[in-house]
Image (cartoon, rainbow, N blue to C red):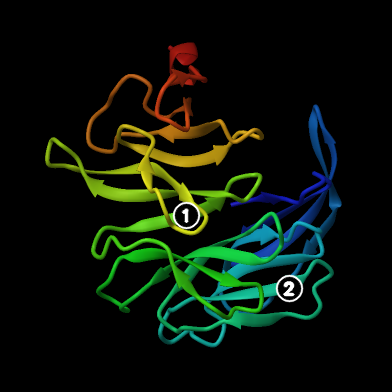
Amino acid sequence: NPAWNPDGTLLAMGSSGQIFTINVTSLEPACVDTNSLFQLTTEGQNFFPDWSPNSEWIVYDSNLGNQSSGFYDLWIIHHDGSSKKRIEANHVGSRIPNWSPDSKHIVHQRTIIPGTGAPEIFVVDTSGYNPIRLTYADQEADMYPRYSPEGNRIAWFAHRETSSGNWAMNVWIMNSDGSNPKKVTSDHAWRFDWSPDESQLVFLFWDTLIERPGNGELWLINVDGSGLRQLTHFKDNSS
């Protein structure tokens, strides 16, 4: 789960439950300075780092202090490893944070009822206060929220029942206040990201139930659900 800092000079990433950064020396071709690898965390299990817009801070989820329960809270740490602090502790499970482009909020997934409820999408301010719940799917999971580049919309994974009676992951979008939620993909969409102009989403198509054309490939779709097209053809090239 690597995360670029805003100017593309650093990567934050997780390995063996700890957060690291590394300098990026070139994008084309991609190249990193292995001597610059720097470990930020040393305790607990820490995952899903994301940068503040000014590249000074990294937000991540951690079970530090909750190892016996296994629950995760939101933490921030300065990029030099100093000033680590827990900013949000509901002790039921807050994970996969994403910093808003205006630096004011952090969106994340949160388990409502430990052990029984599916995660929902919440937003807090950067001090961890003033939580606002954005989704209300109850037992249907909402996960992995990501702000659009301008910050006016949020995309996320939603696990819903399909017309065939199966369950599938799809990408949805909504306004940053939780209004106007809309399904974008038509089933079995996984990892995604926004285009810089917010008009499209790239995602991994993966049907876990049956082998289908385009499985395991990257696809592109307009945010209104139109213009679906396959970007990669790795399986075709290997045959």
| Residue occupying image coordinates x 30% and y 66% | 118
Q: Which percent across, then down, holds residue 133?
A: 42, 69
Dot label at residue 39: none
Q: Nearer the viewer, residue 222 or 60?
A: 222
Quarter of the picture containing the C terminus is top left
Instruction: Label 2: state its secondary structure.
Output: strand
Question: Callout 2, which amino acid?
Answer: Ile
Specify the quadrant of the image occupied by residue 235.
top left
Is mark 2 in CB contact (under 8 Å) with mark 1? Answer: no
Q: Most extreme residue toward the left, as rendered?
A: 165
| Residue occupying image coordinates x 36% and y 65% | 119
Q: Which residue is mark 1?
A: 144
Q: Which residue is mark 2?
A: 77
Indicate whether 103 appears above or below 195. Answer: below
- Asked whether, in this view, residue 150 is left or right of residue 115, the answer is right
Local crowd size for mark 2, using a 10 Å CA cut-off: few (<14), some (14–19), many (≥20)? many
Mark 2 or mark 1, which has the lower sequence index? 2
Specify the quadrant of the image occupied by residue 114.
bottom left
Indicate whether 38 appears above or below 201. Answer: below
